[in-house]
């Protein structure tokens, strides 16, 4: 899948070539729904509350999102249906893996840098909510490896617009490795 024409959304403020949004908003929704040519939305968002199984040497690292749990109690598609897509979009297999991002027309001399990232399941929670330790343990038991505030809303709108999603979860205080940035900005 070519990332060249992807819509690029950054909720971390660390990726200068992306459109930066402080949080998911009407402006984010409009960017995804605009008619410019794209097959993919790349989303970079902060992630918190990593499960112990997804820490490396007691540290959280960036992950590729492979699936989600919607625990927001909300949906950005509430209200009149936008003609860009079906009222209830299918979200199965919406997330791209590292292997899905390989452009067959290009040769990677160092391998695909995205393949060096672990994949994980995100729990989407309501913006501003800080889960308790008990809540985190329940999320982890339900299968989530971390949580964040913007990825799931963005994914729902992308699915509505018929786009795939490459979502990267970046721990607080961390940035994506340079090789990963180069791979998603090609």
Image: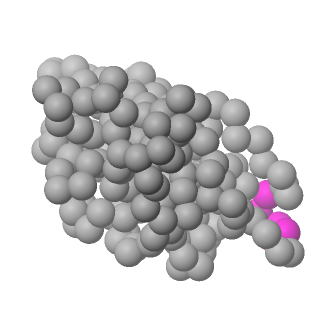
Residue 37 in the image: above or below residue 95: below
Q: Residue 70's x, y, as percent?
A: 63, 48
Q: Which image quarter is the C terminus in?
A: top left
Of residues 65 and 181, the one drawn nearer to the viewer in this rendering: 65
Residue 157 in the image: above or below residue 169: below
Determine the residue positioned at 24% across, 24% down: 116
Residue 159 in the image: above or below residue 79: above
Q: Is residue 125 visible?
A: yes
Of residues 18 and 129, the one drawn nearer to the viewer in this rendering: 129
- Count up the numbered dots: 0
Determine the residue positioned at 34% across, 39% down: 50
Q: Is residue 17 visible?
A: no
**Is 84 included in the stretch rendered in magenta?**
yes
**Is 15 included in the stretch rendered in magenta?**
no
Residue at the far front: name it: 134
**How was this image coloured?**
one colour
Determine the residue positioned at 86% across, 75% down: 80
Helix, strand or loop: magenta stretch: loop
| Apparent side of residue 96 relative to residue 161 in the rendered image (left or right) | left
Q: Residue 157's x, y, as percent?
A: 65, 59
Start-end of magenta stretch? 81-85
Q: Residue 39's x, y, as percent?
A: 56, 47
| Apparent side of residue 92 relative to residue 179 in the rendered image (left or right) | right
Q: Residue 165's x, y, as percent?
A: 53, 44
| Apparent side of residue 33 relative to residue 3 in the rendered image (left or right) | right
Determine the residue positioned at 60% across, 42% down: 69
């Amino acid at each position: 899948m070519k990332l060249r024409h992807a819509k690029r959304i950054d909720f971390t403020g660390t990726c200068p070539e992306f459109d930066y949004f402080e949080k998911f908003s009407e402006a984010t929704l409009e960017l995804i729904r605009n008619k410019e040519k794209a097959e993919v939305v790349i989303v970079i968002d902060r992630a918190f509350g990593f499960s112990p199984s997804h820490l490396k040497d007691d540290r959280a690292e960036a992950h590729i999102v492979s699936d989600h749990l919607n625990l927001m109690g909300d949906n950005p598609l509430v209200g009149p249906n936008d003609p860009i897509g079906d009222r209830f979009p299918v979200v199965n297999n919406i997330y791209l893996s590292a292997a899905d991002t390989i452009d067959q027309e290009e040769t990677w001399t160092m391998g695909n840098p995205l393949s060096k990232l672990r994949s994980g399941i995100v729990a989407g929670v309501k913006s501003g909510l800080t889960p308790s330790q008990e809540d985190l343990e329940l999320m982890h038991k339900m299968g989530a490896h971390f949580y964040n505030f913007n990825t799931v809303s963005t994914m729902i709108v992308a699915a509505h617009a018929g786009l795939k999603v490459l979502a990267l979860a970046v721990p607080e205080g961390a940035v994506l490795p340079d090789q990963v940035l180069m791979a998603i900005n090609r």
